[in-house]
Image: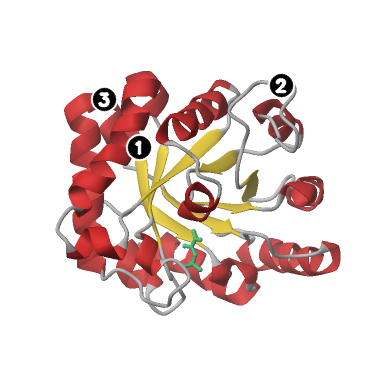
Amino acid sequence: MRRKLVVGNWKMNGNLAQNQRLLEALVHGLKGVGHVDIAVCVPYPYLFQAQHILTGTNIAWGAQNVASHENGAYTGEVSAAMLKEFGASYVIVGHSERSDAYCESSANIADKFAIAKQHGITPIFCVGETLQERESGVMEYAIANQLDAILSVSGGALLDRAVIAYEPVWAIGTNKNATSEQARAAHSFIRERIAAMHPGAAESARIIYGGSVNPRNAAQLLSMSDIDGGLIGRCSLDANDFERICRAACKI
Ligand code: PEP
């Protein structure tokens, strides 16, 4: 049975004082909460702070992006080896806020996925359709295209124990979450797609849902079969909200 995973995506928020309050509140509030893996993905400059406060707790930490190269003349980029030095266990790749704004190609995202895996960091690979794609009936085609780029570059071995985040673009930051049935259907499509190409990886991969998850809708969403957890944006910035979402996941 796959263990639930709840990941906070802080995006470009926080400062040293706020982070300290948030992280300390999470350490205190989530102490002893089991049966769920918990992580926060913080902005790069705060990785050291997260490592300092979270080491030895039940909360892991990670980053929101990684370079697709090992090292070299890539101004402004941060490598997987650097993330590893600060204890990162996870890294988000292909979040729609990045792929849109910074024109990340599927091949580039696949390279980031592979390099994170090679360094022992679990990539959280985001896929999801736009509202237009959903409304025009090409949602599965859009998601399949995103997945296939990874599946063809990474191969089955790299997908083993991978984390895929299904994040419908129309649900991110909008307060319009996918219904639990919409999310379940997308998750089972993703699992079937992985199974068709790499049967072994389909069972071990965790498919988590992201898009306007909050303490009120978390229990229903996270209780669906095939939904293995959540990627939480805004509500991960509030210790009480994030704690309630993690607790909802661990009751299921
Ligand atoms: C996200 O950015 O990954 C996200 C799911 O954001 P929110 O929870 O705020 O919709």
Residue, x 60% and y 47% (percent of image)?
64
The kind of residue tagged 1 is Ala
Residue, x 55% and y 21% (percent of image)?
118
- The residue lying toward the viewer, choosing from 240 and 122, is 122
Q: Mark 2 and mark 1: span between their CA atoms?
A: 29 Å
- The residue lying toward the viewer, choosing from 161 and 97, is 97
Residue, x 36% and y 67% (percent of image)?
170
Q: Is mark 3 within 8 Å of ligand 1?
A: no
Does the residue at mark 1 contact the one at mark 3 (Cβ under 8 Å)?
no
| Secondary structure at numbered mark 2 | loop
Q: Work out which residue is located at the far left of the displayed protein and give it.
A: 137
**Quadrant into which the N terminus falls:** top left
Residue 72: percent from left, percent from top: 74, 20
Quadrant of res 218? bottom left
Q: Which residue is mark 2?
A: 71
The kind of residue tagged 3 is Gly
Q: Which residue is mark 3?
A: 200
Q: Mark 1 and mark 3: span between their CA atoms?
A: 9 Å
Residue 224 visible here: no
| Secondary structure at numbered mark 1 | loop
Does the residue at mark 2 contact the one at mark 1 (Cβ under 8 Å)?
no
Q: Which residue is mark 1?
A: 205
Does the residue at mark 2 contact the one at mark 3 (Cβ under 8 Å)?
no
Residue 21 higher or lower than 43, as above or below: below
Residue, x 32% and y 27% (percent of image)?
151
